[in-house]
Image (cartoon, coloured by chain):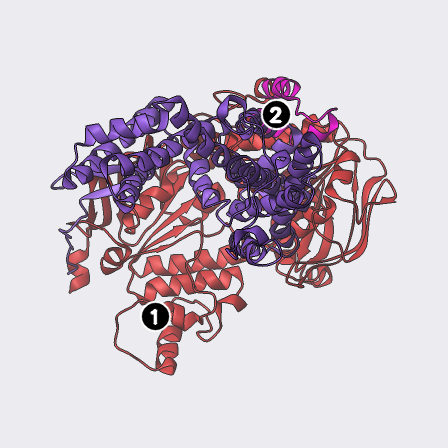
Amino acid sequence: MLKSRRIKGEPLFKIQRIEEESPTKSFIVRVLAVLAALTAGGFFLSLLGHNPLVIYQAMFKGSFGSVMSTQGTVKIVVPLVINALAVSLAFKMRFWNIGTEGQMIVGAIAASYFALFKGNWPHFLLISTMALVSIIAGGLYGLIPAYFKARFSTNETLLTLMANYIALYAVQYLKEGPWKDPGAKGFPQIARFAQNARLSMPLGVHFGWIIALLAVPLVYIYLRYSKQGYEIAVVGESEKTATYAGMSVPKVIMRTMFLSGGLAGLAGMLQASGADRTLTDTVAGGVGFTAIIVAWLANLNPAAVLLVSFLFALLEKGGGYIQSMFKISASAADVLQGIILFFVLAFEFFLRYRIIINKKGD
Amino acid sequence: MEKEQLNGLNAIELKGINKSFGSVVANKNIDLTVRKGEILALLGENGSGKTTLMNMLSGIYRPDSGSVFVYGQEVHIYTPQDALNLGIGMIHQHYKLVDNLSAAENIVLGTKTKKQSMSQLAKNIEQLSLHFGLNIDPNKKIYDMSVSEKQTVEIVKVLYRGAKILVLDEPTAVLTPQESKKLFAIITKMKEEGNSIIIITHKLNEVMEVSDRVSVLRKGECVATVETKKSSAEQLTELMVGRAVDLSIERPETFKSDPVLEIVRLGVRNDEGVEMLKDVNFDLRSGEILGVAGVAGSGQKELCEALAGLQKVEKGAILYYKENIVGRTPDEIIRLGISMSFVPEDRLGMGLVASMGMTDNMLLKTYKQSRGGFVKRSPARLKAKALIERLDIITPGTETPVSKLSGGNVQKVLLGREIESQPNVLITAYPVRGLDINSAYTIYDLLNEQKMKGVAILFIGEDLDVLLELCDRIMVLYDGQVQDILQADQVTKEQIGLLMTGQKPRELKEVR
């Protein structure tokens, strides 16, 4: 006789994919995510012997409490927004450009050449040139992986990632070699930019904030309403469909990556000329990578990019503030940032999947 | 002894089976019995829940509620291994074989029997297959096999594991009529030995030919179980669709002009350098439907893509009104008015952008024609609305992603867009694949309408009955070559079937 088999150990729960969550529920989940993040971070702070509410309040005060702190926060937001927009352009096409860090650095290098050696040009001409060359340099740097992807279908993730390091080491070479500041008493650094090569400071923050604020709607309109934006969406969805529709896929890939790299390059110029007033090897300082998280959290939506960038800047600026106010060590502040970020990202899971608890018994 | 005990019992009994995926109810309160020694056909349109039900029997899904009895015992099947232990073996529509292993290796893969030598194993397999009249070479690698050979390996695989209840999911979808006949002979033999067979299908003639009883599923419910002999194709269709359906396809007479498209000595290689089309010659006139028959992978895809400029042509010419279009880009070909509605197996992979709504999909081939740098969406939205009206497309709105629409509606969007561009040539590959009967007939009507307007239509099909009824001429492809081009009203299904397997027309005449 055949025997029936009864298996007792059924799993306790199963995970089911959700097609698309309603906007209200998405919003609620995101709010819950922030609350959970703050609670978990609060536990951590309590362990360190601090009152979490006081600390959180201080973080907010540290980033938006005064004109000066707000200016500092905006300074963090500017490169983040522009880079996240650059990432969004490429990611919309499903081109995994994780090289905006490098493209930003290359843009900064190109702009710095003019700042250092053509510092006697009139201010407006010099700044315009610097902006233009930074866009071109960043764009061309983004074009390299795009060309190889379009021509030989190489892996763009690897190529853009590696290109970051090339750019970074190029700055270090310039710093210690040809562009070394003779006036720095042997210390390896690049000279500060001449006054003409520095961005003006409307409302106390360098001019980049106006550029960033303009770039948001421009990128939104480009993606949503332009023919090129339409092509990006189609290529991202299916290269076969794009070819079938008569689009030249290599052309779209290369054009979009030029724009993506160009935007990142411009961010590099703004950072060097506006914030740092010189070229350092931390000109990008990981912004290119943070921008990837920002772009994803914003769902590649330019308007949301702006909002998410502010939240990130709050974490960073506020984190710095509590270090000096409460003598919390830098690493503990980083852990706090990490915990909060982890929860916010982890809750995205609940937007894509639903957990079903299996009832007991059959 | 064992057999006697089992006598009189049903092989399988399903009681009140329910299964949902999210908000979609796939199976609703289904009762089903399979007797010992019978062939039960599970009939139903696409999406009626046939495969889901069988997947629960074979341990791939678990029912939300309901009970399963195998030979009278209540069982719980949680894994495919559980199913096999109970003697249930399923042959899936997409074969689950390891390509670079031999037949014998695939057959023993995952079994926990004692180690045996390859030659001993081969002998066992041959014995087993001989018993059922199956023809199999145990040492042949899967990648060297034809579709029907692979299917045989799948069958032997489940038999070798001791299956007494066989579930076949759409087994004839990829077979020629001759191969199907052979398969039916084999399962009939198994039935006579006391095994039970469930065959999932939506082809009525197969149901009538091979089954003892039929259970009909509609929208996840089992609407009826009838004795095949006491039923008819008409009755079954009515059960399946929910109302009476006229099953005949029209073939209107039209005036046929000079060729619009002439294909001369066309040769195409795929990306791996394999010759996919060899010396293909044919012409296509306006006001006709030229059907293309052939086993899957005979060069149909390459032919379509070459005509649309998506595939590099190695040799030969494609003459559009005497002008060679080989080497033109898809863009240039679209502008010549050669509209191609190509529906590959994954429907949304090429012709439509799945995540976009109808409006944006309407723009796909025409967005460049408007002036300026911006996409003009409002005319496209009007076009989409008109199409929804005219073709009865069921969708919440013009901006709903087309991936959310049912297969039939997706097909209507695709074909509707192509027709909207008023083409001279329409190329359509498997346009009714996966559609329910109603949608399929709407598509046939649309194609006939275009034919009467004087459009030249190339119709790549898989159902020979449909090809014979709908098309004016039928071209048979085999291994990238044109076997013959025949008048559809002067040829039988069997003749086409033979040509599809590579027999030369001359040999065919001798057979006749």
> Position of B118 compared to A89: left or right?
left
Q: Are marks 1 and 2 in contact (CB under 8 Å)?
A: no
Which of the 4 image quarters holds residue B133? Answer: bottom left
Q: Which residues are magenta?
A: B358-387
Chain letter of mark 2 equals A
Q: Which mark is residue A225?
A: 2
Q: Is residue B26 visible?
A: no
Q: Looking at the picture, does residue B292 appear above or below residue B165? A: above
Please state, as top left, top right, bottom left or bottom right, where the N terminus of chain B lies in the image.
bottom left
Label 1: how many residues lie within 10 Å, few (<14), some (14-19) or many (20+)? some
Q: Is residue B356 visible?
A: yes
Look at the numbered disc 1 and give the secondary structure of its residue. helix
Figure chain in red: B
Residue drawn at x 70%, y 27% is B373
Q: Main secondary structure of the magenta part?
A: helix
Instruction: Verify whether residue B369 appears in magenta.
Output: yes
Chain letter of mark 1 equals B
Residue type (three-letter) at the residue carrying disc 1: Val
> Position of B228 compared to B195: left or right?
right
Please state, as top left, top right, bottom left or bottom right, where the C terminus of chain B lies in the image.
bottom right
Q: Position of residue B383 (x, y in %)?
A: 64, 20
Name chain A's colour: purple
Q: Position of residue A311 (x, y in %)?
A: 38, 30
Front-lying residue, A72 or B399: A72
Q: Looking at the picture, does residue B95 appear above or below residue B260? A: below
Instruction: List the residue tagged with mark 1.
Output: B108
Look at the numbered disc 2 and give the secondary structure of its residue. helix
Residue type (three-letter) at the residue carrying disc 2: Tyr
Q: Position of residue B232 (x, y in %)?
A: 44, 36
